Amino acid sequence: MKKKIGVFSLAVLLVLSVTLAGCSASPATKVKLSPDDPVSLEVWHYYNGPQKEAFDEMVAEFNDTVGMEKGITVEAFNKGNVNELTDAVLASANKKVGADEVPDIFAGYADTAYQVDKLGMVASLDNYLTKKEIEEYIPSYIEEGRFDSEENLKIFPFAKSMEVMMINKTDWDKFASATGASLDSLNTIEGLTDTAKKYYDWSGGKAFFNRDAMANYMIIGSKQLGVEIFEVKNGEVTFNLDKDVMRKLWDNYYVPFINGYFASYGRFASDDAKTGDIIALVGSSSGATYYPTKVTVSDTESYPIETVVMQAPEFKDGKKVAVQQGAGMVVVKSDERKEYASTVFLKWLTDAKRNIDFSITSGYLPVKKEANTREMLETAVEEAGDNAISDNLAKTLPIAVDITNNNELYTNKAFEGGTNARNILEASMKKKAAADAEAVKAAVASGTAKEAAIAAYNTDENFNQWYEKLKKELDETQK
């Protein structure tokens, strides 16, 4: 009798274990894909030029290999730049008249994913990835994709970029030779400001520096100085505009700008470098391919330049914090077969070697821990050959990897009105500096001494007015 009971108990335990296993099994273990019943996926992205070519090649390779084997066909569409892609995604998600159907996957930043997720249209990817697979990615990249209240993974990391400093070494060397200036002075933001003044004085009034992405300067600069401007908890944002921190940001951008040490003329800082209007800039590592190899003085005059790439300067007494940027891939909620097929494709895309191959043509960084080493990147560049990658990009990628490994990487959590709030930070100080710089020039042209013209704007009152206006504009994004 005891033996029979034991056998019966064992049978019950086996049935229970199978039942529980079935209940806890993830969709990934239940979904079956087959070339006899293929899944078609549409991907929208914003890659252009070499980046688009590299992405298209990877999609074609996937379709001819793993896609063919498993029955997954991917079709990729460029939707313009980041802003145009965002507009297209939101128009589709909101079913606006004339908009296309939403894609199965789109490249997106957290703010865009947040807005689409509010409509209940973003798939959670945790069930399609094992814990071990998730741990292969750089933690902050995974964390960026967990923006909802339950911290589900809703953005798959694909390609990231850092900010770097790029310097026209050819013209820098002339300045350094005459003045004794050292590149080490550009390691800090305060040193950059001082060096820009020295260059202005030495050159007879030429600007030294410009930067892209003012919002990064505001957000990362404040974070380095110990204050998180966009503090997000449970989807609610608190704006932290520490007045002393804002003044330091002001003194190291607005003040040198109205003095003429910094300047902005073209759409991007690299445009100003091409014309020789500046010789140093901070921009995205993914923009390295656009940094000039020559300065064009006029239609008939130009000269070649050598470039040096450095880490973006940080505040002298601040924390080592660097911006984390670059869109991830968002999977639109559909059925388990499409969602699973999407993650099969995205995991294939982010294979360490494959992700590095994309990096050396695009300027974006790979997203797995394994791939973010100088050794792997330098090996990939060497294997690609001399003509496969520009000299500027070859110099940029190792610096960007060092930034990834030696700094706290930061991007704020998504929140309601986040895009508008970032746009305000992007424009606020930049527009103010440009307008007041023009006013200074006009005053000087009318006979006012330059020192007096600048002094009229470099005041506590002017700063306070700008500061209060910025606070008000940010608060209004939450009404």
Image (cartoon, helix red, strand yellow):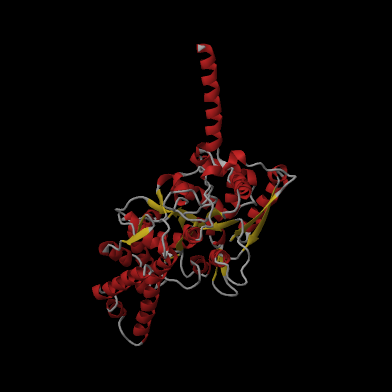
Q: Nearer the viewer, residue 392 or 128?
A: 128
Q: Residue at x 52, y 46 (%)?
A: 367
Please give left or right for residue 76 compared with residue 302 in the image. Answer: right
Image vertical order of residue 220 relative to residue 386, above or below: below
In the rendered view of the protein, which quadrant contains the C terminus? bottom left
The x and y percentages for residue 94 are 55, 66
Q: Is residue 251 left or right of residue 62?
A: left
Q: Is residue 340 above or below residue 447?
A: above
Residue at 51% x, 16% y is: 5
State whether residue 153 is above or below residue 43: above
Left/right of residue 14 with respect to residue 464 in the rendered view: right
Q: In the figure, residue 475 lies in which quadrant?
A: bottom left
**In which quadrant of the rendered view does residue 300 lie?**
bottom right
Nearer to the camera, 221 or 341: 341
Give residue 430's position: percent from left, percent from top.
40, 71
Residue found at the very far bottom of the displayed protein: 446
Residue drawn at x 57%, y 50% is: 359
Question: Could you say where residue 201 lies in the image, as x and y percent from the top left?
Answer: 36, 69
In the orientation shown, which residue stands out farthest toward the right?
36
Point out residue 371 in the picture as x, y percentages from the top left corner. Answer: 53, 42
Residue 14 seen in this snapshot: yes
Q: Residue at x 50, y 66 (%)?
A: 273
